[in-house]
Image (cartoon, grey):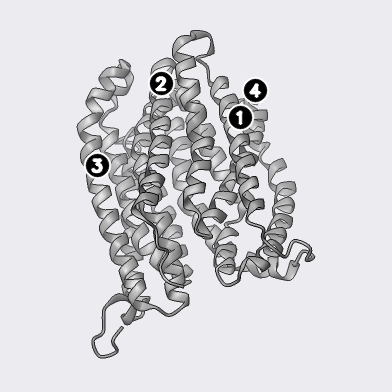
Amino acid sequence: MPLMRVSHLDRLFNLGMRGMTLLAKFLLIFFLARFLEPHELGLYGLLVAAIGYALYLLGLDFYAYTTRELLKYDRAHWGGMLKSQGALTLVLYSIVLPLLLLVFVGGKLPWWAAGWFFALIILEHLNQEASRLLIAVSDPLFASAALFLRQGAWVLLLVPAMYADPDIRMLASVLVAWTVGGFVALSLCVWRLISMRMGGWSLPVDWSWIVKGVRVALPLLVATLAIRALFTIDRYWLESLAGLDVLGAYVLFISIATVMGAFLEAGVFVFAYPGLIAAFQKEQPANFRLGMRKLCMQTVFLVIGFCILALSLIDPLLHWLDRPLYREHVEVFPWVLLAMALYNLSMIPHYALYAQRLDRAIIQSHIVALLLFVPVTWSLVSTWPTLAVPVGLCVAFSLVLVWKVAAYIRLTPVRYRHHSPASGV
């Protein structure tokens, strides 16, 4: 299977849809920062972080196994594999969802948000799995359209309504609109998957296949939970150090910085990694090298460009928000921007390792980064209470980048890294 061929028009459409989604997310975070009190924005950040982390417990990163399995077979077999994955999902729901009540019992989140919290977890998880499947089977354009419905369209309706009506300027309005958008997106994804006419649905659930997949996915899950823990612990740790008001400023700044990753996901990563997997499985080193060269150049270019743009625009944006608290803590922004830049650069060797099934290096880098983040941040708490967390993230993601680059150089066969005139590949 050659590298996935995508026309310039398709790529522009994908970037357009993702761009509209990002614009909507920008509007949401900035209008929330302007209309809500900082402590409410901080609570929103805690909810988003908790939902994001819970998604991995529900999914077990099983998609990492399913994706590579699907690419081995034609559509006549896909239904059976997806049916088995669905059975695993039901088991995980019965275990994980009750445990998540501890977040409310422990007082980390308010009980009034519990219903929306669980509805959003389920919708986000099912949407996420459906989108990953669409991307894996080379339908990233439809995945982007569904993402726009899930994260963008409802925002473009809600923001003008909040602007016009002060009575709905509350966090509950956001949760309601988010839930509706997630339901609409999921309905569309289900229709699309049904229209693909995949076979194998009549086959019984293959528990041996599930067990094999869990064994493959669990180590990757450990790695994912370790790296995502950094994006969850940071908020809860900062809230304990400085309170919800300062956390609100942090949520604003890191929300801006994480847009960088969303741009890369839309314009680079979703097109790159299926081709890398296929090139390696089919032993096509020339295609693999070409894919890596494009991945590297496009990622570096977008990271540098985004950082320059973000640093030049942050002051005018804070002036528009007219919230003194955010300007008081603007020194946090360059640090979170650097952290996100390092993290996104580490995705270049990450996808190369993932395509070759060199998962151990990925797992090791994420676990060690989490273990490093805690003592580094702890050591800075007494001197830099508001900067300890973002500086800790920078140190952790620097380690991840160096570790993955070293693993890529050490473990990737030479012919997949360099052209060999002697072999002709």
In this figure, which residue is indicated by the disc labeled 4? Answer: 112
Cα–Cα span, label 2 and label 4: 23 Å
Q: Nearer the viewer, residue 304 or 233?
A: 304
- Location of residue 258 in the rendering, given as x and y in whole percent from the top left corner: 37, 41
**What kind of element bears circle 4?**
helix
**Of the image marks 3 and 1, the number of the one nearer the N terminus:** 1
Residue 262 seen: yes
Q: Say above or below: 115 vs 424.
A: above
**Of the image marks 2 and 1, the number of the one nearer the N terminus:** 2
Give residue 322's quadrant in the image. Answer: top left
In this figure, which residue is indicated by the disc labeled 1? Answer: 180
- Location of residue 292 in the rendering, given as x and y in whole percent from the top left corner: 32, 66
- Contact, CB < 8 Å: mark 4 with mark 3? no
**Of the image marks 3 and 2, the number of the one nearer the N terminus:** 2
Which mark's residue is nearer the viewer, 4 or 3? 3
**What kind of element bears circle 1?**
helix
In this figure, which residue is indicated by the disc labeled 2? Answer: 31
**What kind of element bears circle 3?**
helix
Q: Nearer the viewer, residue 298 or 325?
A: 298
Left or right of 326? Residue 159 is right
- Contact, CB < 8 Å: mark 2 with mark 4? no
Give the residue type that dot 3 points to. Answer: Cys
Give the residue type that dot 2 points to. Answer: Phe
Q: Residue at x 69, y 69 (%)?
A: 209
Q: Residue at x 25, y 19 (%)?
A: 319
**Of the image marks 4 and 3, the number of the one nearer the N terminus:** 4
Q: Nearer the viewer, residue 367 or 8?
A: 8
